[in-house]
Amino acid sequence: MSKTNNNDVSLWRERIEACKTSNLSIKSWCRENSINPSVYHYWFKKLNYKIENTETKWAEIKIEPEKKLSSLESPIIVHFHDFKIEIPRNFEKAAIVEVLSAIHSIC
């Protein structure tokens, strides 16, 4: 088994940096440079390169406490076959008639 020489290491460091700065995918860069992607990945791993943008990024999410609705604000809930429809108190009667008619026609 042959040992890795410094020329190979330098060459592959240059190639990996060239790929990273090319704005191409590894697959595209390898194709354009007549390099087998599996050989590229071998050297990438061997030289302990870290894949960028793989760190976990956390986003802050604020959850507002659930607002209690008064009976005048709470929706009307209609159970119809397998459907559950929540209707706001300020609904348009014509709209709910259309919705119920459409549901009835498919049931």
Image (cartoon, rainbow, N blue to C red):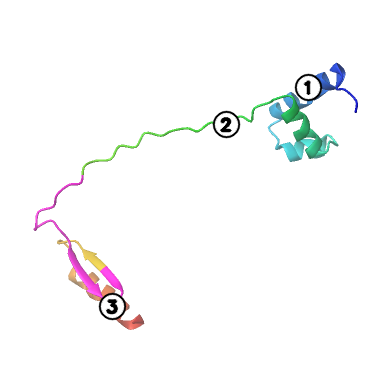
Q: Of marks 3 and 1, which one's residue comes earlier in the chain? A: 1
Q: Which mark is on residue 14?
A: 1
Rendered residue at 36%/81% (across/down):
106
| Residue that carries the numbered disc 2 in the rendered image | 53
**Residue type indicated by callout 3:** His
- 81 vs 44, left or right, is left
Q: Is residue 56 magenta?
A: no
- 11 vs 87, left or right, is right
Q: Position of residue 16 (x, y in %)?
A: 75, 27
What's the magenta region?
66-84
Question: Can you say which quadrant of the picture contains the C terminus?
Answer: bottom left
Question: Can you say which quadrant of the picture contains the N terminus?
Answer: top right
Q: From the viewer's perspective, is residue 92 above or below residue 37?
A: below
Q: Position of residue 88 (x, y in %)?
A: 19, 61
Rendered residue at 69%/26% (across/down):
21
**Residue type indicated by callout 2:** Asn
The alpha-carbon separation of the residues under discs 3 and 1 comes to 67 Å
Q: From the viewer's perspective, is residue 56 above or below residue 14?
A: below
> Considering the numbered disc 3 on the image, is that residue within a helix, a strand or a loop?
loop
Callout 2 environment at 10 Å: few (<14), some (14 to 19), or many (20+)?
few
The alpha-carbon separation of the residues under discs 2 and 3 comes to 49 Å
Rendered residue at 64%/27% (across/down):
50
